[in-house]
Structures are given as structure tokens and as C-alpha cells.
Amino acid sequence: MRLTHNYRYSLVLLSFALSFGAMAQEHHAQYHDVYQGWVNQQGKDCCHGQDCGVMKKDDVDDTGEVLKIRIDGQWCPVNNWMTLKKGKSPDWSVVHACINHRIVDMAPCDRLMCFAGRPQM
């Protein structure tokens, strides 16, 4: 069966959209207005569309000396510069993070831009 260009293009877009659905973050739309004002300790904006969201509990490891979150299957340390300089968590009972999923060739740990964790962390 020969696929038309438009059909192939649609399949590529669908697979791209489905890969975003498998990200470790959830609920971006619910908190988007809050995320838009986030700035990290380096003075960089964190929210660029769909970058921020609630981290799934299984993707946060606060058991060691260094807090880590899982990005694309890799455990990444949360550095101090990633915490918020401007903005606040919309819900302190969960972990929020802004992870750049737009640049596909970026290493997983380099994708983390902002972080707001639970107060006990």
C-alpha cells in the first residue's frame, strides 16, 4: 500500500504527540497561568508552552543526599539554580518541574529548567 505525503505527515505528527503523552509530567494546563511567571535562580524563564507540570511520584527520588527526578528514563540531580527565583508552587503537596521537551537532541538532565518541590525536601 502506498501512503500519500499527507497521510505520512499525519502519522509522524501523531507519533510525536503520543510521545509527549508519555512524559513524566502531568496537569500543565491546570497550572499554566502560574507556571508562566516562573523564573529560575539564573534569571531564565521556565515555561515555554508545555514544559512545566506535576511530576509523577515514581519519577522523584528524595531518599538520598541529592534530590533527583527521572527525565526520559535517566535520574537527574536537581541543582540549586533550578529552584524558583520568581514564582511559587501552585500546589506544595506535589513536585512541579519545567523540562524542555522541544529540543530533541538535548541530554535528559540538561532539559531540567525549573523545580518546585514539596517543602520537606
Image (cartoon, rainbow, N blue to C red):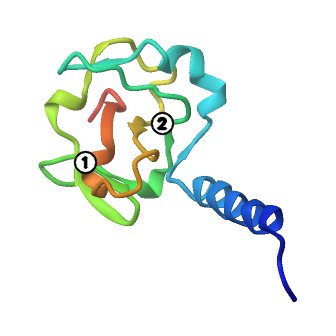
- Where does label 2 land, which residue? 51
Above or below — where is 34 with respect to 67?
A: above
Q: Give the SS element for disc 1.
A: helix
Give the residue at x 73% y 60%.
14
Looking at the image, which residue sits at the far right? 1
Above or below — where is 43 with respect to 79?
A: above
In the image, what residue type sits under mark 1? Asp
95 or 70: which is nearer to us? 70
Please tell me in which quadrant of the rendered image residue 78 appears. top left
- Left or right of residue 113: residue 66: left
Q: Residues within 10 Å of mark 2 (few under 14, many from 20)?
A: many
Answer yes or no: do the residues labelled 1 and 2 have beta carbons within 8 Å? no
Give the residue at x 31% y 64%.
74
CA gap, disc 1 and disc 2: 13 Å
In the image, what residue type sits under mark 2? Asp
- Image quarter where the N terminus lies is bottom right
Looking at the image, which residue sits at the far bottom? 1
Residue 101, how many percent across, how many down? 45, 47
Residue 106, how many percent across, how many down? 31, 53
- Left or right of residue 49: residue 77: left
Give the residue at x 40% y 48%.
103
- Where does label 1 land, which residue? 110
Looking at the image, which residue sits at the far left? 65
Q: Give the SS element for disc 2.
A: loop
Residue 113, how many percent across, how many down? 31, 34
8 or 29: which is nearer to us? 8
Give the residue at x 45% y 25%.
47
Residue 71, how many percent across, how many down? 37, 56
